[in-house]
Image: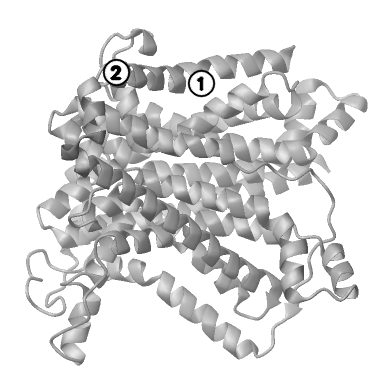
């Protein structure tokens, strides 16, 4: 009964936080018949263009991310060479760049007046090749930005391959193609489908790349914000519902995990021509770190000095020194003060609800899981519009709470938005082995509390710490929800960087982005390592 109560409490809270605002959004959309007619009317070609462009770019992003991630995971996971660690690190480098900062780096790396075009004019000739623009530029940035998520899934998939099945197939004379179709693909399909699923949804929800690099093209995420800012709320609600419906429909195709088995661990072979593999690993790191180096270089450019010159002519430390002014670091402090509590609340929720879902009866599990997935599956633009609709007035959907003009709505949105990945980390570990461990501890006489904290929690902590570090990084760099829900009192760092770009303060914006990248990289390293150290010290004290 204890776990069943947790499941029903979690379901009710998530229904209030996610389903009620979305239901209100649907209700507002139904009341806009003129806007719906515009979708099929001749004058609604801009809306249809936004839908088609978003879907095509997102589908291309999902397929490219999965293909590249699978190749990198197979190469770095099944070959041994001295640069193998670099090959596994390189696909994760985009995690340290928040969306807006990463797009800004690409904009000044390959743009018409970017560093690559300037270097071409400086050293080759005055007519550099045309840079990527429009949907192609958005697609390239999406593949770079969402590759880490796909790579983590595919790396885990390759790590779960059963070597015994592969050896048996080779013994029977299976060709490489037959091995791929009959042995590898059935085992890799959940990871591959998960990669397509998560990268497609992330691409549909993307706002920064279409906003800064989309050119004259139209995208659903940017169209929604533009119409809201322009006062066209009826059409904004309709486009929001269309965007949410496309993304949520993929939940029905979400991959299911394979039954828990004990496969023979895959073997890795010594790479032939290791110098070639090491060179490729070095080149991969060089390509993936180019946006970081661009951001670092731009952070020293004197504002207003780089106009028509091929390369920045003046450099200064003033951009970094100016960040110590209280007015400058206040937005960063706001982001940290909102992201840290949101991540902590999400971790506590994930521990309680994750245990209830994994160890409790199955009766209430599907509802909590499905509703929780909606907070991540529905694009940030749609969720932001839904929360605005619910908490902008004393609606029943918001239980009469008016949060839209208060500093509490944005951190609350961060917590709800990124909580599902923390819950998934806990349930994934517990469903694999946590139930048996806790049951064994209870059989040996441990109390429920002692079994939970001394047996189950140390097992869950590494995965929960990794997911929480990722949730913290995403919350600090969140741009789409922030631009919809922030107020002047809690202005986050992403909005401050956008303001500096609009004022053409390139060096100052890059300096902010550089320090955010350093901070987020440190969080991704320190939080999991701190959890590991705590586990090690607890084990030594117990022994």
- Mark number for residue 28? 2
Visible residue check, residue 337: no
Pick the residue in front: 302 or 485.
485
Q: Residue furthest right?
A: 444
Residue in the picture at 10% in, 71% down = 306
Applied colour scheme: one colour
> Could you say which quadrant of the image residue 229 lies in?
top left
Q: Which quadrant is home to the C terminus?
A: top right
Residue 34 sits above or below residue 173 on the image: above
Nearer the N terminus, badge 2 or badge 1?
1
> Could you say which quadrant of the image residue 254 lies in?
top right
Estimate how packed mark 2 is, as few (under 14), some (14 to 19) or many (20 or more) residues with alpha carbons within 10 Å: some
Q: Is residue 341 left or right of residue 156?
A: left
Q: Is residue 311 left or right of residue 448?
A: left
> How far apart are the alpha carbons under marks 2 and 1?
21 Å
Pick the residue in front: 247 or 273.
247
What residue sits right under mark 1 in the picture?
Answer: 14
Residue in the picture at 51% in, 46% down = 469
Q: Is residue 39 left or right of residue 192?
A: left
Estimate how packed mark 1 is, as few (under 14), some (14 to 19) or many (20 or more) residues with alpha carbons within 10 Å: many
x%, y% of residue 256? 67, 41
Pick the residue in front: 43 or 2.
43
Residue in the picture at 39% in, 26% down = 412
Residue 402 sits above or below residue 500 on the image: above
Nearer mark to the viewer, of 2 and 1: 2
């Amino acid at each position: 009964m204890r776990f069943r109560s947790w499941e029903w409490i979690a379901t009710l809270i998530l229904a209030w936080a996610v389903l009620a605002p979305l239901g209100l959004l649907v209700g507002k959309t139904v009341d806009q018949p003129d806007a719906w007619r515009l979708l099929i009317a001749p004058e609604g070609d801009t809306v249809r263009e936004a839908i088609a462009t978003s879907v095509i770019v997102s589908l291309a992003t999902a397929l490219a991310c999965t293909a590249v991630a699978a190749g990198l995971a197979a190469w770095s996971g099944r070959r041994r060479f001295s640069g193998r660690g670099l090959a596994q690190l390189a696909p994760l480098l985009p995690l340290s760049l928040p969306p807006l900062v990463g797009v800004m780096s690409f904009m000044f790396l390959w743009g018409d007046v970017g560093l690559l075009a300037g270097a071409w004019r400086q050293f080759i000739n005055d007519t550099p090749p045309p840079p990527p623009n429009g949907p192609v530029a958005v697609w390239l940035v999406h593949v770079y930005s969402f590759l880490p998520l796909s790579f983590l899934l595919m790396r885990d998939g390759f790590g779960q391959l059963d070597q015994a099945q592969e050896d048996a197939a080779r013994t029977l004379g299976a060709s490489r193609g037959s091995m791929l179709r009959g042995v590898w693909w059935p085992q890799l399909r959940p990871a591959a489908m998960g990669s397509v699923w998560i990268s497609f949804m992330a691409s549909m929800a993307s706002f920064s790349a279409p906003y800064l690099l989309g050119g004259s093209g139209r995208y659903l995420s940017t169209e929604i914000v533009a119409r809201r800012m322009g006062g066209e709320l009826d059409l904004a609600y309709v486009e929001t519902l269309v965007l949410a419906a496309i993304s949520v429909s993929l939940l029905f195709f979400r991959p299911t995990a394979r039954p828990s088995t004990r496969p023979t661990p895959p073997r890795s072979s010594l790479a032939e021509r290791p110098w070639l593999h090491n060179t490729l690993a070095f080149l991969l790191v060089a390509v993936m770190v180019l946006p970081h180096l661009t951001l670092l270089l731009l952070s020293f450019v004197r504002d207003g000095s780089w106009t028509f010159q091929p390369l920045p002519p003046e450099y200064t430390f003033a951009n970094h020194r100016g960040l110590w002014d209280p007015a400058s670091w206040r937005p960063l402090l706001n982001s940290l003060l909102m992201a840290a509590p949101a991540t902590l609340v999400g971790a506590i929720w994930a521990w309680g609800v994750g245990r209830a879902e994994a160890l409790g009866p199955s009766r209430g599990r599907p509802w909590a899981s499905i509703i929780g997935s909606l907070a991540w599956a529905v694009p940030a633009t749609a969720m932001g519009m839904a929360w605005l609709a619910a908490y902008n007035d004393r609606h029943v959907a918001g239980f009469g709470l008016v949060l839209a003009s208060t500093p509490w709505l944005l951190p609350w949105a961060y917590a709800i938005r990124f909580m599902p990945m923390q819950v998934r980390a806990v349930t994934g570990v517990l469903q694999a082995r946590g139930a048996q461990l806790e049951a064994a501890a209870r059989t040996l006489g441990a109390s429920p509390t002692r079994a939970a904290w001394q047996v189950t929690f140390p097992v869950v902590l590494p995965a929960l710490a990794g997911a929480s570090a990722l949730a913290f990084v995403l919350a600090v760099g969140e741009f789409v929800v922030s631009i919809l829900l922030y107020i002047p009192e809690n202005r986050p760092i992403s909005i401050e960087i956008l303001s500096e770009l609009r004022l053409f303060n390139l060096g100052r914006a890059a300096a902010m982005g550089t320090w955010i990248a350093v901070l987020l990289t440190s969080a991704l390293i320190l939080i999991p390592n701190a959890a590991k150290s705590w586990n090690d010290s607890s084990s030594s004290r117990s022994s």
